Amino acid sequence: MKRIIKKVAVVGSGIMGSGIACHLANIGLEVLLLDIVPNALTEAEEKKGLTLESKVVRNRVVNDHLANALKSKPSPIYNIKFANRIITGNTTDDMSKIASCDWIIEVVVERLDIKKIVFEQIDKYRKPGTLVTSNTSGIPIQFMSEGRSDDFQAHFCGTHFFNPARYLKLFEIIPGPKTNPEVLDFLTEYGSKFLGKTSVVAKDTPAFIGNRIGIFGIQSLFHLVKEMGLTIEEVDKLTGPVIGRPKSATFRTVDVVGLDTLVHVANGLYENCSNDEAHDLFQLPDFISKMMENKWLGSKTGQGFYKKEGKEILSLDLNTLEYRAAKKASFATLELTKTIDKPIDRFKVLVKGKDKAGEFYRKNFAAMFAYCSNRIPEISDDFYKIDDAMKAGFGWENGPFEIWNAIGVANGIELMKAEGYEPAAWVTEMVAAGNTSFYTVKEGASYAYSIPSKSQAKVPGQDAFIILNNIRESKKVWSNSGAVIQHLGDGILNLEFQSKMNTIGGDVLQAINKAIDLAEKEYNGLVIGNQGANFSVGANIGMIFMMAVEQEYDELNMAIKLFQDTMMRVRYSAAPVIVAPHGMTLGGGCEMTMHADRVVASAETYIGLVEFGVGVIPGGGGSKEMALRASDLFHKNDVELNVLQEYFLTIGMAKVATSAYEAFDMGVLQKGKDIVVVNKDRQIAVAKQVALQMAEQGYTQPIQRKDVKVLGKQALGMFLVGTDQMQAGKYISEHDRKIANKLAYVMAGGDLSEPTLVSEQYLLDIEREAFLSLCTERKTLERIQFMLTKGKPLRN
């Protein structure tokens, strides 16, 4: 049966419920968000003469929770306007409204008795066939639907979102005893395609998959840190980006999530997993119990493993339980990995370390490998689901079995035995049968060892994806030191940046031109996209800095012209060029995006022209493009200066969109032309389809524009007066004013006496001239140097 979701009810508006409601609104659904009626009036409400019968008062709980969520950082919503899709109400007056909903999600307090009362009400009002799911993180699904109607039970299961719902990709689906298999299939597909999640069907076991493995990992570290005499800074150094984990690593992550949240799940596992071989590990160490007593729960109470005093960050000494100045952690083993770009390639080096870091990794990975292998088939029949869960729910770049695979299956077994562990029987059988790897790649697809068939089987659900890691070598057409061109099939190429942070330097520009040459002569179209952490942080400012310091202005002029000309080739090639930005897409990365025929952006795209932060204006066509886009919005009888000013301020304030949808409001993405993909894993495949569609429909090379309306002195005068006032009011520095005035000159089209139609090349020439003149300024060089050394902008 085809099922369409138009309206969803979320019952429970706390942090999790409001976050889920916002993400459902993000994808265009109408959301009914309900919570309880407050027991009493507040003092403020009494003064206003309100009563409990007032709708404002009766919806206070849900409205307050939603308002707090919308104010939180990072935001749970792609665009604040999307909050209008959420209708609030209360469970006393508005429960009957769930009859119009296609899916009802329960997100109330983690108490079975309260959940069962809510489900009784839902069963009374829901229409037959409506999906009902619980966002529980640990209560057995089998107990929740007891006593409910047959139709309720057939359409009921767990759907565990991770917090924050917008950003964490894991979507655990847990069947109840009578759940219709069609419901599981639908939610798996819906979670991936529409919610942008990694859908993982889990068994109804304590804490399901993500939290079972994740809490084991953290509890294991809590015990190991004492055993090895490590500091919290050392553990966070060892368990952060160096092994492909978030910067917050272990202890900072616990502070953000809340120690009480972690303890609640750990206690649940201790009570409900009596047969778990690691049962005792879930018992809280003494220092955790003491922190709970002291209410040192992390960010929510102002102190946890870390504490901020003034500008100083203090760390907790786990032996004395006193705060002290943070100590810098360093290990010789980590130094050996500095030249290894990808975390997956570092693990072989890390486990061979001769210092305390090597010992830590051997103990930590041995315990994790043993524990995960023993959870099959208890929590899942397929080990790859554990990897999926840890990557999507905890931000790990590689799951436990992927790490084990990278070390070598046999080496991992030796590691375990040296630490007193034995692998699960299925792993021993796998190796005995001659299988030396958990994963393989065949014809661009990922395969994983299947325990029932004792052979490699294709991992399901990847047909909608193109995984660049799987095709990089087999489908390579051309490469250099900064990029690789692959054939995606059907005559569509993909250009993947591989420079540090995907910066755009000479090698990347060469690759862009080569890819366009190939697309024009031998193929049908080109996608510029990658699957790294970020699309591109912009031009290689280190190269610009060196040229400017050496006063090699002719060479710098040629380099900037090459950048501009390459962006114009992206715009005016004879084959369609699709750019697929995601993550940080800054400066030159943004300029490239703005010059594409079409953009297929990930919803989580943080895009903007940020050149002001390093003392220059956008010089790769960004300033020209903003003037052009403003010109295209000029209409008869409009106040054209106001339109141009908006685009000027977008650059001058170095605005960065916090989602692709905000980028439409900024004019960086264009409505009716560019599209947004919620699931980043599908982005390259969608971009390929867009390129193929454009080619098949008959793509014609565009003609360069010579009709850009610039306003000349009229606009320039307004901008110059504005920057003078901003400096006089001490809102900007003298150098800020100088940069802004250069930008004003470009976007006004120079000091022309009257509004004039000019060509793009005219604007590019004055843009490049302005950029070069700023590179001769000492304060600009100070800004670039500060960014290169400190990683943040300098105001001087």
Image (cartoon, rainbow, N blue to C red):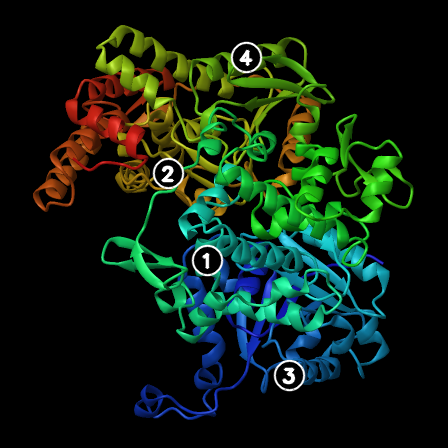
Circle nearer the N terminus (2, 1): 1
Tell whether label 3 touches label 4 (CB within 8 Å).
no
Counting from the top left corner in percent of width and height, residue 430 is at 85, 39
From the viewer's perspective, is the residue at label 4 or at label 1 nearer? 4
Tell whether label 2 touches label 4 (CB within 8 Å).
no
Query: Mark 4 belongs to which amino acid?
Result: Asn
Q: Secondary structure at mark 3?
A: helix
Label at residue 480: 4
Circle nearer the N terminus (3, 1): 1
Question: Against 72, is 109 above or below?
Answer: below
Task: Using a 10 Å C-alpha cutoff, classify the residue at mark 3 as few (fewer than 14 neighbours), some (14 to 19) or many (20 or more).
Answer: few
Circle nearer the N terminus (3, 2): 3
Query: Mark 1 belongs to which amino acid?
Result: Lys
Tell whether label 1 touches label 2 (CB within 8 Å).
no
Q: Is residue 747 left or right of residue 72?
A: left
Residue placed most toward the observer, 699 or 732: 732
Query: Mark 2 belongs to which amino acid?
Result: His
Counting from the top left corner in percent of width and height, residue 618 is at 32, 27
Q: Secondary structure at mark 4?
A: loop
Q: Secondary structure at mark 1?
A: helix
Query: What separation in Å lies between label 2 and label 1 (alpha carbons)?
Result: 25 Å
Label at residue 114: 3
Question: Against 43, is 267 above or below?
Answer: above
Counting from the top left corner in percent of width and height, residue 604 is at 51, 44
* Quadrant (top left, top right, bottom left, bottom right) of the N terminus: bottom right
Question: Against 429, is 206 above or below?
Answer: below
From the viewer's perspective, is the residue at label 2 or at label 1 nearer? 1
Q: Quadrant of residue 57?
A: bottom left
What residue is at 74 percent from the left and 59 percent from the top?
A: 4
Query: What separation in Å lies between label 3 and label 1 (alpha carbons)?
Result: 33 Å
